[in-house]
Each structure stands twice: as C-alpha cells, then as structure tokens.
Image (cartoon, grey):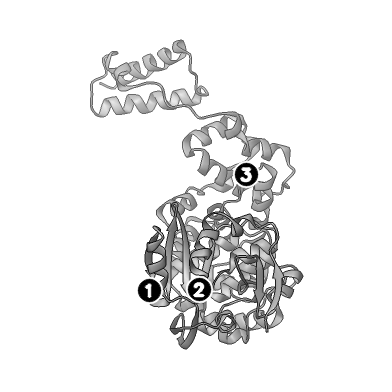
C-alpha cells in the first residue's frame, strides 16, 4: 500500500522542462513520475539538482514521444531501460519501470514492468524510493516518508540482500547517512555492512573514489567516518590508518576562513601524512592526475607555521600557487596544537585574499643586454636573479629590479 504526501511550492516540478517532460510521458495509457533524490531533497527542503524520471512507457515509446516533440533522446542505458532526454540543453534520465529477474553482484537481469511498488522495492534506501507525480503527490511504498521525518537511513527489505546486489551500497549507506541522517546509524544496516565489508575489494577503484569523495563533503562526515573506522571499513578503503582528528580539524579550518569544502583537500587530511600515503591513495582510488598532484604538493606540511613570518608565507604562496598553498596550510593547521579560532593560523591561511603572488618581472632580454650569452649561463643568471628578487620580498620598482639584474649579470660574468 502506498502512503501519500504532497510537494508544495515545487516550481521545478510544476513548470519548466520537468513539467513538459512529464506531460509528454504521463498520458495515453502511460504514467511518469519524478523519482529518487529530487523527491527526497524537496521533502527535506534541500536544493534539488539532478532530476530523474521513471515511466511505464518502454524505451522505444519514450524515444518516439520525445523525438516527436522535437527534443533529443540519447540511449545512454538502453539495455536497462534508460534514455537521456535533453530539453533546452538540460538532460534528464528517463527509465522504464523494472523488475529484477536475476541479480548477481552489481549486475542484474531486468524486465520492464508497470508496477510502481515493485520498482520501488528494488531500490537501495527507503528515502531514495519515493516518487512524485506531476501534481506534486508523493508516493511511498517502503516507509520512506517516515524515515525522512526521523532522518533515518534504512535499506529496503533485507540489508544483506541489498548489499549483495551491489557492494558499493556499503559506502552509500554511510554517505547518505552523513548527508541526510541524524543520530546513530541503523543497527541492522550497519551490521550487514560490517558482515559484507570484504565485498568492497571486488569494486572498481573508480567507483570507490567517486563514493568516498562524495562522503567527505557531507555535513556529518566525521561521525560517519569514525564508525567506518571502528568497523574496519575505512581502513579497507584507504589501505592505511585514517587521520580522523586531522579531517575534522580541516573541516573546521575551512569554515573558519570561509573556504568552500574541498573533497581532495579533505582526503589529504584524512589519509596523507607522507608522500608514500599519497601514492598509495592514488593507486587504491585511481585518483585523477590533478588530485594526485595536489596530494603530492602536501609534502613538507610539517614545516608550515605562522611563526615563520609573512615573508616565508609569501614565498610559499609564490612557489605553490593559491590552491596548493591553501591545502598545505590548512593541513598543517589541522595537525597543530592550535584550534580553529587561532588568529595567527587564520591570518596565514587567508594570505591569498590579501596578496597575489606576482610573476617574476625580469626576462632573458634584461640579461642579454648586460652581456650574458644565451644558453646555460642565461638560465643560471635568471635563476639567481629570481632568488634575489624573492629574498628581497618581491619588489616591483624598476630601480630595485635593475639592481638585481645587474648583480646577477655581474656574478655570471665572474664565472666566465
């Protein structure tokens, strides 16, 4: 039996592209509803981002109607009944109702169906299995409305069975609780996750990376990670000892300087003490090149301190760039004895807001005009001049720059 609620003031549902799509599919003997995260978020007064639609119409009929209306239909997952519909440049995944004929790990043999309750029962968590009609009526076949009210994340049916269908649901259990739950994790779900944790080793590294990075950005990530660590799950994912205190302190430091939450930085706080840790995480999670380079740039984090002074901070910012400077400073801060209210650390971390590292203003021509020949000696002169310019705290007046160039050229000639 379905329980009902209503989405009030859901402009995104009752107007615009979503309304046009539902009107197209929700007629002539077929039904269509918005499903999943969009409904959950709307009920929790959270931003609605991705909007997915389920329908009784089979993929060929979805495609026919969409194209007849002048919209684009892309068969992105046609074997599982999914067509991506593009309306005015906005994509929407439209999936035909399904029933599992056979499941084996992440794979499943499905058949198309017309039963909304049966389709809901094959999903992962109760709060993710809600659907909403075009008029705003919310349909609940699994107790998701009560769980949203209680901020309680529960598997649908037997947790062990849901996890056996896809072991990534272990991480999704902690991720969704960290985003949408409150209080202790559901005991039955937690027990099933612990019992099945060995299945995480069967998952692709890309899927582990994606799920973990989403978890690290959640409002209640720290308590979820703490339970994962106690259960032996987090160590399995990271391949090392998690640094939970550093992670929580980085979250606080980001808030203290009004920095946007950053998943890569938080991964560094959680798992990188040495460069060997960065290399291990890169391999274990198949990080992107950019993510790996940021973790490697944390090297020597333990040398960073406000006590070194403003000039040392400027030098570090010049050498690293603003993004890596923020990463290294916030990581160092998170592992210091200072709290998030510490004024000296806050001033150090906000240096990029007060000072932009300049480009080295001297060029090869400045030394060629002073008799330095092109080639290795030119490179030596440029490097010496740049170091002198840095040591002088990045002067920009012409007299100081001329003096630096003249001295570097003179020293260069003395080596001839």
Question: First in sequence: mark 2 or mark 3?
Answer: 2
Residue for point 60% across, 29% down: 354
Q: Which residue is mark 1?
A: 60
> Tags 1 and 3 in contact by the CB under 8 Å rule?
no
Camera-side residue of 93 and 410: 93
| Alpha carbon separation for disc pair 1 and 3 | 47 Å
Task: Label 1, secondary structure: give it.
Answer: helix
Task: Label 2, secondary structure: give it.
Answer: strand
> Tags 2 and 1 in contact by the CB under 8 Å rule?
no
The answer to whether 412 is drawn above or below residue 350 in the figure is: above
Residue for point 29% across, 22% down: 415
Q: Which residue is mark 2?
A: 55
Judged by depth in the image, the label closer to the viewer, 1 or 3, is: 1
Residue for point 56% across, 83% down: 162
Across and down, in percent, residue 136 comes to 65, 65
Quick one: label 2, few (<14), some, or many (20+) residues within 10 Å? many
The answer to whether 317 is drawn above or below residue 287 in the figure is: above
| Alpha carbon separation for disc pair 2 and 3 | 41 Å
């Amino acid at each position: 039996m379905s329980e009902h609620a209503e989405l009030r003031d859901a402009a995104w549902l009752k107007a615009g592209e979503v309304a046009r799509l539902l009107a197209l599919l929700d007629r002539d003997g077929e039904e269509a509803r918005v499903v999943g995260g969009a409904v959950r978020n709307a009920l929790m007064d959270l931003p609605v981002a991705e909007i997915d639609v389920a329908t009784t119409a089979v993929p060929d009929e979805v495609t026919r109607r969409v194209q007849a209306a002048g919209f684009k239909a892309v068969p992105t997952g046609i074997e599982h009944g999914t067509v991506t519909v593009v309306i005015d440049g906005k994509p929407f995944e439209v999936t035909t109702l399904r029933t599992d004929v056979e499941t084996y790990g992440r794979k499943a043999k499905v058949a198309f169906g017309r039963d909304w309750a049966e389709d809901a029962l094959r999903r992962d968590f109760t709060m993710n299995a809600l659907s909403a009609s075009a008029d705003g009526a919310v349909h609940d076949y699994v107790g998701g409305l009560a769980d949203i009210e209680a901020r309680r994340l529960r598997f649908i049916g037997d947790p062990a069975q849901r996890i056996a269908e896809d072991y990534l649901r272990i991480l999704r259990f902690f991720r969704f609780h960290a985003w949408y739950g409150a209080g202790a994790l559901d005991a039955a779900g937690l027990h099933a996750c612990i019992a099945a944790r060995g299945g995480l080793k069967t998952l692709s590294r890309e899927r582990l990376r994606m799920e973990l990075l989403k978890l690290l950005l959640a409002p209640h990530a720290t308590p979820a990670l703490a339970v994962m660590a106690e259960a032996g799950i987090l160590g399995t994912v990271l391949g090392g000892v998690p640094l939970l205190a550093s992670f929580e302190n980085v979250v606080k430091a980001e808030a203290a300087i009004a920095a946007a939450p950053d998943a890569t930085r938080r991964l560094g706080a959680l798992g990188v003490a040495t460069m060997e840790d960065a290399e291990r995480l890169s391999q274990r999670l198949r990080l992107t090149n950019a993510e790996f380079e940021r973790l490697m740039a944390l090297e020597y984090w333990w040398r960073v301190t406000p006590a070194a002074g403003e000039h040392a901070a400027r030098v570090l910012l010049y050498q690293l760039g603003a993004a890596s400077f923020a990463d290294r400073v916030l990581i160092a801060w998170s592992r210091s004895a200072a709290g998030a209210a510490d004024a000296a650390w806050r001033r150090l971390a906000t240096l990029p807001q007060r000072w932009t590292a300049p480009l080295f203003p001297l060029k090869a021509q400045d030394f060629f005009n002073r008799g330095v020949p092109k080639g290795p000696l030119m490179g030596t002169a440029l490097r010496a001049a740049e170091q002198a310019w840095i040591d002088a705290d990045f002067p920009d007046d012409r007299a100081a720059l001329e003096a630096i160039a003249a001295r570097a050229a003179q020293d260069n000639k003395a080596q001839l």
